[in-house]
Amino acid sequence: MRPQKPGLPAGGYVMTGHILAIDQGTTSTRAIIFDQDLKVTASAQREFPQHFPQSGWVEHDPEDLLNSTVATCREAIDKSGVVPAAIGITNQRETVVVWDRRTGRAIHNAIVWQDRRTSDICTALRADGVELDITQRTGLLLDPYFSATKIAWILDQVPGAREAATDGDLLAGTVDCWLIWRLTGGRVHATDATNASRTMLFNIHALAWDAELCDTLRVPGLMLPELHDCADAFGTTDASILGHEIPILGVAGDQQAATIGQACFQPGMMKSTYGTGCFALLNTGDTPVASQNRLLTTVAYQLDGRAAYALEGSIFIAGAVVQWLRDGLHIIGSADESGTLAEHADAEQGVYIVPAFTGMGAPYWDADCRGAIFGLTRAAGRAELARAALESVAFQTRDLLGAMHADWQAAGQGGLDTVLRVDGGMTASNWTMQALADITGAPVDRPHVLETTAIGAAWLAGHQAGICPDQETFAANWAQERRFEPAMPADESERRYAGWQDAVRRTLSAP
């Protein structure tokens, strides 16, 4: 750790070895300032509107993403009284923005990762026989979830956009890229390997944009950003925007940032994040493991030009099902009531919620099915629905674990002794974490610090700045707050999981 020289810049702020982590999520933006020991000094958070123009469509106003970022960063800096030495950015992945390079303004709302409007485009591409090639190059499945078909849709729907893109007048990027462009005053168009690996345009073997994929998916390569390691120089913020010139030195998509924050640096380590959706990543080291069970092969992180890979399972609806209980059904007043309510449910009712509000993710990848509830009786009520909602997250996690175990063995790695390192808002519920351990049959480790996504981004930037410790020291400092061991009898867990599998079969759309 290199010592920093404190100073006193204009405005009375102290220049110290602090790091500002920007965590731009699906429903809110947070800014957290960490000291060099990665302890929180100050934070700020703002929600922003969600837009649902049609069924299955989800959009954000790109200016809301920027404005909430700027406002929270300024608030955190003011609260702390320090000028951070570096910025790390972590962001919702796959969500994409297309903007005019001359004006810096988006030509359409951001299309969010949950959005399913390009299902027909994916179906047509699949009929053309290109899915296998896409999967082999990118590690991804041909699905509306990823960014490429979203970009193509915008270019086709906005008058004159395709011609402007071909002429080099339009830029495209994931949310990190959009923020970097605007925060640097339009001087830097860049992204990192983790975000690039979620676009369906990035070759995970060459670690580069793939020209043939750009042609296949009809995205002009001129639109795409420069590629960087996760810890690298991404430009410096314009002083007029945050009040100070601060170098951006770390970037990673939110799930990869959480993998880093959970110190899952060794092959076989696994983390699972429970936010709006749920995302489980299994570190596979320097070898990209091709999934035989419809998981994704992705870049876990890239440092010093070398990539570490992961198998990933993506669940579209996790915490969002609790929001639905609150905002849609109005059977709870706040999210934290769900666990208390579930605790008093009659487990023998056998109620299952399959929360396919925007289709099903891994390992099913059914964009067209929609949510369903099974097993209702006159005796079922609020408590049973709350329990079914929370258990749906545990059941979906077990789906992912089963697929990961199979892929790990198929890759010749032998057995996988799974311990789940968990993070995200849902992990605060002891009932939910115990249900997760019971249903999956795996120990669940909850860390002392749940801000793992922001910590991952902060460590990347701080490591690049010479403020934070190396990988080994950082990993050694990871601390467990509580371990949840499986307590449900195995036969009961199997019976309940069989009921879930039956409910899913009934929900999936017909082939």
Image (cartoon, rainbow, N blue to C red):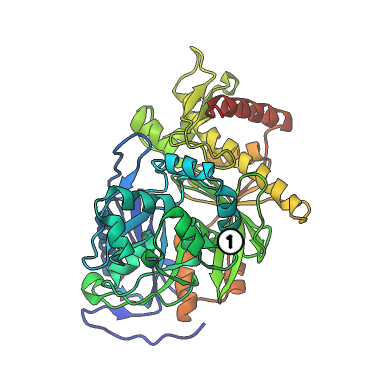
The residue type indicated by label 1 comes to Ala
Relative to residue 49, is residue 347 depicted above or below? above
Q: Between residue 285 and residue 174, name the one nearer to us.
A: 174
Residue 103, image x and y in percent? 21, 66
User: Badge 1: few (under 14), some or many (20 or more) residues near its Cα, within 10 Å?
Assistant: few
- Classify residue 480 by image quadrant: bottom right
Q: Residue furthest top?
A: 378
| Relative to 162, 316 lies left or right | right
What's the residue at 39%, 50% (across, down)?
150
Q: Quadrant of the C terminus?
A: top right
Q: Between residue 128 and residue 217, name the one nearer to us.
A: 128
| Relative to 321, 470 lies left or right | right
- Classify residue 298 by image quadrant: bottom right
What's the residue at 28%, 56% (across, down)?
161
Q: Between residue 330 and residue 367, name the one nearer to us.
A: 367
> Which residue is denoted by mark 1 in the rendering?
479
Q: Is residue 281 visible?
A: no
What's the residue at 65%, 40% (across, down)?
440
| Relative to 433, 174 lies left or right | left
Q: How many marks?
A: 1
Q: Is residue 218 visible?
A: yes
What's the residue at 27%, 46% (across, down)?
49
Considering the numbered disc 1 on the image, is that residue within a helix, a strand or a loop?
loop
Residue 255, image x and y in percent? 50, 56
